[in-house]
Image: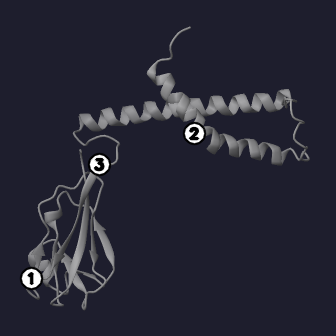
């Protein structure tokens, strides 16, 4: 007997997981649309054998799940190869990140976020602390953050995300002497 290769082993796990989702829903839909009445479970020792139409439906659902998983694997691999060719990265969630606070140092003077690279298509999220006395301001430069007419106002306990390549592109300015923000960024790699 031949030993299954790694791809068939990974597909078998996906088939099992997918069966509970798409397969179970399709089977339920089939029985509901065919208007059959519920039957008692077979007596102990008896085995329920589905009719040919039901059996063909089950086989078709399982084959469809396997086909979809294979296509998804092929598509993910193609996108990762293309992304790597352009130096963008692969389709995978970042494995970590940073979450920190910045507290007011001088009222009305903007503070730059630290130098921290932001993965492609991710955001730097800044959240005004719940205990802030005044709205804080966020800008793309020191002068912009300090200018009430140009900065993005964050009310206390409010959060906003910005897609930038580095956290240090953003500045925060505080009006309340004990105000602060929490900020967070996901990180590429381990």
Q: Quadrant of residue 79?
A: top left
Give the secondary structure at mark 3.
Answer: loop
Q: Earlier in the sequence, mark 1 or mark 3?
A: 3
Q: Are marks 3 and 2 in contact (CB under 8 Å)?
A: no
Residue at 38%, 32% (x, y): give it.
77
The image quarter containing residue 46 is top right
Q: Decide: is 153 above or below 12.
A: below
Q: Quadrant of the N terminus?
A: top right
Foreground pick, 99 / 34: 99
CA separation in Å, label 1 and label 3: 32 Å
| Sequence-first disc among 2 and 1 | 2
Cα–Cα span, label 2 and label 1: 52 Å
Q: CA distance from mark 3 to mark 2?
A: 24 Å
Q: Looking at the picture, how far across and down is residue 94, in whole percent?
A: 30, 49
**Residue occupying the far top of the picture:** 1
Residue 24, position as x, y percentages in the image = 69, 43
Q: Earlier in the sequence, mark 3 or mark 2?
A: 2
Q: Residue at x 60, y 34 (%)?
A: 65
Residue 17 circle label: 2
Q: Residue 97: give x, y in percent of width and height.
A: 25, 56
User: Residue 82: percent from the left, percent from the top?
Assistant: 31, 35
Tell me the element at label 1: loop
Circle 1 residue: 105
> Callout 2: helix, strand or loop?
helix
Residue identified by numbered label 3: 95
| Image quadrant assignment for residue 189 | top left
Q: Which residue shows up at 90% across the image and 43% down it? A: 40
């Amino acid at each position: 007997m031949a030993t299954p290769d790694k791809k068939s082993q990974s597909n078998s796990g996906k088939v099992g997981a997918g069966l509970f989702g798409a397969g179970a829903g399709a089977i339920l839909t089939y029985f509901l649309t065919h208007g059959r009445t519920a039957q008692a479970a077979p007596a102990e020792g008896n085995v329920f054998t589905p009719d040919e139409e039901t059996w063909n439906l089950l086989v078709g659902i399982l084959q469809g799940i396997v086909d979809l998983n294979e296509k998804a694997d092929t598509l993910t691999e193609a996108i990762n190869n293309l992304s790597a060719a352009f130096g963008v990265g692969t389709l995978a969630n970042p494995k970590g990140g940073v979450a920190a606070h910045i507290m007011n140092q001088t009222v009305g003077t903007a503070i730059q976020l630290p130098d921290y690279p932001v993965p492609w298509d991710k955001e730097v999220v800044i959240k005004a602390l719940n205990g802030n006395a005044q709205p804080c301001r966020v800008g793309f430069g020191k002068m912009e953050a300090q200018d009430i007419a140009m900065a993005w106002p964050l009310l206390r306990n409010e959060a906003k995300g910005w897609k930038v390549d580095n956290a240090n592109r953003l500045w925060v300015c505080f009006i309340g002497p004990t105000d602060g923000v929490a900020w967070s960024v996901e990180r590429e790699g381990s």
